[in-house]
Image (spheres, rainbow, N blue to C red):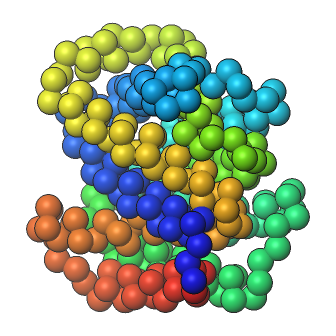
Amino acid sequence: MIGIGEWAALGTALAWTLSALAWTAAGQRIGAWATSFIRLLMASVMLAAYGRLVRGLWFPSDASPTTWWYLSLSGLCGFFLSDLLFFRALVLIGPRRALLVQSLTPLITALLAAALLGDRLLPLDWLGMLLTVTGIAWVIRGRGAASHGAAGHEQLGLGLVLAIIATVAQAIGFVFSKQGIGQYDAVAGTFIRVLAALAGFLVLTTMARRWATVLGALRHREAMAITAYGSLVGPCLGVALSLVAIRHCHAGVAATLISTSPVMILPFAVLVYRERLNVHAIGGAILSVCGVALLTL
């Protein structure tokens, strides 16, 4: 029987799929940097409003210092550092290679959780993770024809290094979330993660003198509407569900189920972007579903 943790992880994957579509549309209008910064700003406002209405607190002031510490580290690793490096890797090596590297996140998460938290997986869990990750990689590989150009050796090497560091940072973020969330409110915990990432972006935007880009983007009404929608389903709903998933099941299993977004996005690719699915996409999706079945059933 599928537990609440597995359902929450699959819900996270769907939420991140929907938000990825929103980020793509917004990024095409105002750029990746402005989109990344503004989505966190909007998510902070939404999460503060939720805290006031549901918990009577604008700010997660009731969290313990330990919760603040680990969830802040999780936000800096998973939201700030990982996203920053991954967006750069996308430019250098293209989405196919970057996503292929990122598909290793569940395995790295499982190894870190086993080493640092003592989480142990059964042989069937490892098999389910392997099938799911292989299916995801197959789906991404099958979409390789859509990438443009060939990176030079230096550009390729730098891009792969950045993608690997981003993937490890995301896995570390999962482990810190697992260690920090405990029984604390998942949405308030998400707010702590967002605040930490937002602080990182504030410092970096100031150092890089990118405020003109961010302020100019705020005047683009259509992009702001799309970003607001993406902020609601991604950093708010999606990340809150991910913390519920991490609380109720093994961090590696949660990371694997959450990483099925490249498979979930296939119907949208057909319906929205009119893409044709090839044998890689279909075979990878079937393999991934078999892996998810092993992990959840």
Report the quarter where the C terminus lies. Answer: bottom right
Side of 68 where 13 appears, left or right = left
> Does residue 69 lie above or below 290 as drawn?
above
Residue at image coords 82%, 67%: 119
Please count the marks in the image.
Answer: 0
Side of 262 where 149 appears, left or right = left
- Quarter where residue 234 is shown: top left
Q: Is residue 167 visible?
A: no
Taking depth in this image into account, of 281 and 260 the one nearest to the observer is 260
Residue at image coords 85%, 58%: 117
Side of 269 where 115 appears, left or right = right
- Quarter where residue 276 is shown: bottom left
Residue at image coords 31%, 12%: 215
Image location (x, y in percent) of residue 254 = 61, 65
Side of 270 where 124 appears, left or right = right
Image location (x, y in percent) of residue 185 = 63, 41
> Does residue 193 lie above or below 203 as drawn?
below
Image location (x, y in percent) of residue 294 = 58, 87
> Does residue 56 lie above or below 8 as drawn?
above
Q: Is residue 16 visible?
A: yes
Image location (x, y in percent) of residue 121 = 77, 77
Report the quarter where the N terminus lies. Answer: bottom right
- Quarter where residue 111 is shown: bottom right
